[in-house]
Structures are given as structure tokens and as C-alpha cells.
Amino acid sequence: MARPAFRRVDRPEEGGPRRAPLDRDRALVEAAQADPARFDALYRKYVAQVYSYAYYELHDRHEAEDATERTFMAALTGLGRFEERALPADGTGASTFRVWLFQIARNVVAERRRRLRRRPEAPLDAAGMLAAPLDVEGEATRRDDAEAALRAVARLPEDRRRAVILRFVEEMSTTEIAGVLGRSEGAVRVLIHRALRSVARDLGDPRR
Amino acid sequence: MTWAPAGRDSRDIEALVTDRYLETLLAAHARGADSGPAPAEADPVLRLIMGRLARDLPRLHPSFRFEEALADRLAEAAARIGTSSLNRAPGSLAALPDGAVRLEPSGQVLPPAGRPLLLRGALTSAALSLAGAAFLAWRFKRQSAGPMARAVRAVARTRLA
């Protein structure tokens, strides 16, 4: 029988104040819940992350922009129902708002991908993603490397690819990715480990 | 039979070691360093792959024009929603911004409805009322063809005659 999962939470000291739940976006979320006009601060903080995630998943600037817009519109209209769930054990960097936002983004992107499935998928264009080069020769090599890495990531199965993008591009913790993908932390670690093995096989031995 | 749990354990341990190294690597990247101290047990091939992905998967930024245009649309939507709608009572109307997707409490996102959303029970009861009225109108218009109905109609005609 599977054991129920309990999260370890530090007990408050006897007679001491009970520690409030933590969320690094708490103040911004509370302000936006009180006055939707103040949602702008949360939008500015996360727009690049959501857009980036959508671009890696959809391979198209216009589709990524559309997914970004739908994600933030849904977040704005649903913000009243958002509940902070961060715990002291999650550490000071935890943001359940970011996890919630990326759950919306994941669903929006999945819906777009289903709709786009009939169309041929455009490859990710590293040339369009990297900044203009100063060292042209060195930059060309780097661009080739980046394109190979992007292709290897794009070929990964859906769940592994998402986990890799959230870990490397969005720099989310394993705990956050587990929240976004609805998996256990152990499962996320294994997903990423397997994804890295697949990418290593695909790219060949990088020491050569 | 001990092979299965042992296999799972070693897989989990490898994944944990990779995760620990990745944590160090991403923290070093955040500080602007190339990489952090590598744990001796981390696979050297995977270490190189992790370094390469950390370097070659950049975070992308939307265009300034798009970011500002969306900020304006969100501000308009926020003004329409207003403070009161965030604590809306069940059964009331919520006007969603044009083209907005709907967000279920489970986090599921539904495609844009293109019209105001009627919250909870009201829609169901209205649909049932319309269906009931339509059924009664149809039932009154249609004469039953069963033997009992025919007999009743024959008796009625006889009495009237």
C-alpha cells in the first residue's frame, strides 16, 4: 500500500509566534488581489519567463505571444481564487504564484500544441534566439552548438522536454517543477536525469 | 528477489547526484561563474551536457512592443474586472476580457467563450426550464397513437354525437 505523503514542516517554538506561510511574491499577489490594476508588477516580473517557456514549446514567435497573452489574461481573471501554499520548509525562494502561473501556461501551451499538431512543426531557430555576434567565427561555432542542443532538446519526449526547459531555462527548483507538472520531486529528478542521458546520446560525447 | 528495488534505488541515487550537481551549476551561473565545484560522483559526460545546456538554452524575451501592448490590454482588463469581481458571489455575471481563456479551479484552461460567463447553477436551471417548456408544448400538440388514447377519443366523439 502506498504511504501517504507528508511534508515535514518545522514546528513553531513553544510559546513563540507561528511562522506565516512564505511566498516571495506574497506582497505583489495580495496587492493585485486587492486591486487588479496592480497585477502589472507580477506581469512584468514573469512575462519573459512565460514567453520563453511558450517559445521553446511552440517554436513560433506569434504562437508564443498568443500563449503568453492567454496565460496572463487567465491568471488575471483567476487571481481571486489563487491560494498561497508555500510552507517554511520550501525556503525563502519559494513562489507558489510562479508554480500556479506555469500550471496555466502549461495548459495553454498544451491546448495550442493540440491545435497545431496538424501543421508541420518549425524547428527552433538558434540564429533568431542568440544576440548579434561580435566574434563572427567563434559565434558561428557557438551557434552550431546551440542549434544541435536545441534540436536534441526538441526531440525529447514531451514530459522530459518540459522538465528540462523549466530546469535550465526558467531555473526552477525540482520542487517547483514537481508542482507545475503534477509529479513527485523524485519523478522530476528521474525525468531530468533520463533527459540528460538522451541528450548526451544525441549529441555524442561532448569531450570529443 | 532484490534486483528491482536495488535498480530503482540506484536510478534514484544517480538522479539525485545529477540534481545536486545541477543545483550547484545553476547557482554558479546565477553568480556569473562558469561552474561550481563538481561532486566527484557526478558522471563527467552528464556534467559536460549540463554545462552545455545551461549555456545554450537562453531565456528569451518578447519584443518591447509586444510587452507594452499586452501590458495595456491587461490594464484595460483589470479596469473592467474591478475590485468587486474578485470576490464575486455564485450565480453572478462575470465579463471576461475579449479572447480570454477560462480558468477552471483545477487549473484546466478552457478556450475563450466569446460571451459573458454565467457562473454556476443559473445556466443549468435555465436550460432545464427551456427544455421543460418545449416538452410540454410538443406533448400538447402531438396526439398519442396508443390503443388507450384511440379508445378515449372514440368515446369522446360518441358522447359529443
Image (spheres, coloured by chain):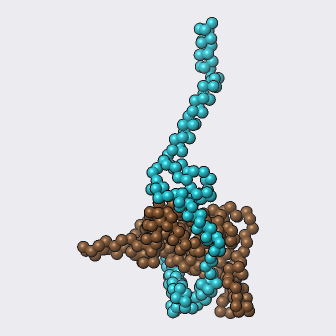
Chain colours: A brown, B cyan
In the image, farthest residue toward the left: A15
- Left or right of B15 in this view: A148: right
- Left or right of B138 in this view: B7: left
- Left or right of A136 in this view: B45: left
Query: In the picture, residue A31 is in which quadrant?
Result: bottom left
Vertical arrangement, residue B67 with respect to residue B140, above or below:
below
Tell me residue A65's x, y (percent). Answer: 65, 68
Image quadrant occupied by the C terminus of chain A: bottom right
Q: Nearer the viewer, residue B104 or B18?
A: B104
- Decide if residue B36 is in sight here: yes
- Decide if residue A138 is in sight here: no
Tell me residue A21's x, y (percent). Answer: 38, 71
Vertical arrangement, residue A184 with respect to residue B87, above or below:
below
Tell me residue A164's x, y (percent). Answer: 59, 77
Query: In the picture, residue A126 is in which quadrant?
Result: bottom right
Residue beneath the point at 32% across and 74% down: A11
Tell me residue A67's x, y (percent). Answer: 63, 66
Q: Nearer the viewer, residue A40 or A188?
A: A40
Image quadrant occupied by the N terminus of chain A: bottom left
Residue beneath the point at 67% across and 82% down: A130
Q: Nearer the viewer, residue B110 or B159?
A: B110
Residue beneath the point at 57% across and 74% down: A49
Vertical arrangement, residue B147 with respect to residue A78, above or below:
above
